[in-house]
Amino acid sequence: QVQLVESGGGLVQAGGSLRLSCAASGRTFSTYMVAWFRQAPGKEREFVAVIGRSGESTLYADFVKDRFTISRDNAQNSAYLQMNSLEPEDTAIYYCAAKTDRLLTIRAQNYDYWGQGTQVTVSS
């Protein structure tokens, strides 16, 4: 099992940046694929980005448009989401998720472990 705790959310103006962190505890972090999802009010949870076990592979949602970067530091048992050029449409609760298979999966139901989420609010 792995426990995930997100941090780094907050209120930022449009065009600003935030860096989200996902701290993991439990089994060896490097054995997990890690992804970020988000959920806005009244909308379904949607995929943002995923990173491979050693950081060698990444996949992003189209709406990221080179604004976001996912990374990880297995020595620190942490993953990150650097978000630049934020837009009001990026306002949502952002969740960190993990799974043990090697597929770069974008479906939320394929992830076994979830954090509690961190709120990101972008004002116009």
Image: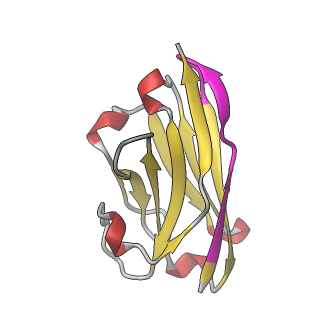
Q: Residue at x 54, y 60 (%)?
A: 96
| Camera-side residue of 23 and 95 | 95
Residue 100: within the magenta?
no
Report the quarter where the N terminus lies. bottom right
Residue 13, above or below 69:
above
| Camera-side residue of 85 and 13 | 13
**Magenta residues (range):** 3-17
x%, y% of residue 84? 53, 28
x%, y% of residue 73? 63, 62
Pick out the residue farthest to the front: 42
| Camera-side residue of 33 and 13 | 13
Q: Residue at x 63, y 86 (%)?
A: 27
Residue 17, above or below 32:
above
Residue 26, above or below 21:
below
x%, y% of residue 122? 55, 24
Q: How many marks?
A: 0
Residue 5: within the magenta?
yes
